Image (cartoon, rainbow, N blue to C red):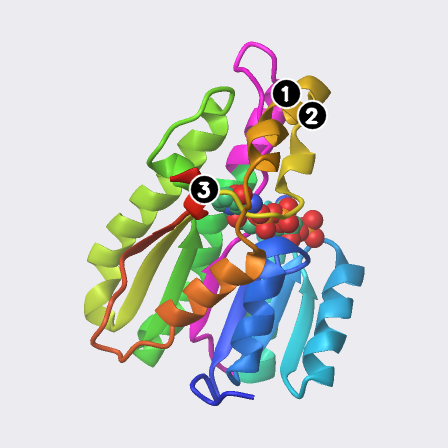
Amino acid sequence: LGSELDEQVALVTGASSGIGSATAASLASRGARVVLASRREDELEELEARIEDDGGEALVVETDVTNDDDIDNVVETTLDEYGRIDILVNNAGLMPLAHIAEGDRETLQTTIDVNLSGLIKLTHAVVPTMIDQESGYIVNVSSVVGRFLQPNSSHYNATKAGVKTFGDSLRLDVAEEGIHVATIEPGSVDTELLDHIPDDELQSDVREPVGSMESLAPEDIARTITFVVTQPPRVDINEVLVRPIDQV
Ligand code: NDP
């Protein structure tokens, strides 16, 4: 195990699969105690066991980021258990793409609730602790679509652009408290994300270009996030765009 993050506590949302799972494992391998937060408790417990088998420390807190009580609970449970929060990785997200005329209203709302409202509310719940500590890292997972737009994604693109604007604005308020804010913008990463596209035809259309290139592995983004949070305190990595070389 590495020791750069010894004694530090990292809260990772969407830790049950993909980027969040790989990130939690990576931070744990550097010595962080990781809190695994999302809805699928079984997957979180599997990851907890893996981290502990490798000599790390993890805590599962079943969390739906669209539920205000769950947001309060994950922060309170983390503080009860570990007494601090050094790193917040706001990674939970959904990508149920659809043409604006075809997606249903509930899907639009859920996308905003998870990708944007949940991220903002959890940050709001964590920041006072980081202000007391006079330090912290908030890492928000946006997307390449925050910069390069794609069709059939207007609601999703809006949430990811919102994540970027939220982070850039947040930094203005919290940098002087010693809190770092980073926006991560992954290109195509091989995860469960495309499974959320409700329309089968659109799902296969989106999979086609993705299938013809070598996507990033979740570990590639995990490594990027770990790099961001292991800098000297004077360094604030604002933003990282990471694409597969075939997607450039
Ligand atoms: P996955 O589908 O593998 O992971 C999404 C995670 O979000 C799951 O762990 C899921 O956990 C969690 N999640 C979904 N809804 C909620 C909720 N209501 N409350 C708590 N957690 C929730 O996909 P990725 O790993 O790819 O996605 C992670 C992030 O990366 C997302 O924000 C996505 O937009 C972003 N991203 C991904 C890209 C890609 O190509 N894969 C490209 C650019 C950005 P559970 O079901 O257990 O709640």
**Which residue has dot 1 on it?**
202
Q: SS of the residue at dot 3?
A: helix
- Mark 3 or 1, closer to the camera: 3
Of the pair 111 and 188, the residue shown nearer to us: 188
Asked if the residue at tag 3 contacts the one at tag 2, i.e. Cβ–Cβ closer than 8 Å, the answer is no
Q: Residues within 10 Å of mark 2 (few under 14, many from 20)?
A: some
Magenta part, dominant SS: loop
Horizontal placement of 34 versus 7: left or right?
right
Horizontal placement of 160 versus 37: left or right?
left
Q: Residue at x 55, y 73 (%)?
A: 26
**First of labels 2, 3 by sequence position:** 2
Give me the C-alpha separation between circle 3 and circle 1.
Answer: 22 Å
Give me the C-alpha separation between circle 2 and circle 3.
Answer: 26 Å
**Three-letter amino acid code at disc 3?**
Asp
**Which residue has dot 3 on it?**
246
Q: Residues within 10 Å of mark 1 (few under 14, many from 20)?
A: some
Q: Is residue 113 depicted above or below 26 in this figure?
A: above
Residue 63: give x, y in percent of width and height: 65, 57
Residue 178: give x, y in percent of width and height: 25, 73
**First of labels 3, 1 by sequence position:** 1
**Which residue has dot 2 on it?**
198
Quadrant showing the N terminus: bottom right
Determine the residue located farthest toward the right in the rendered image: 42
Determine the image quadrant of residue 97: top right
**Three-letter amino acid code at disc 2?**
Pro
| Magenta span contains residue 8 | no
Q: Which residues are magenta?
A: 83-112
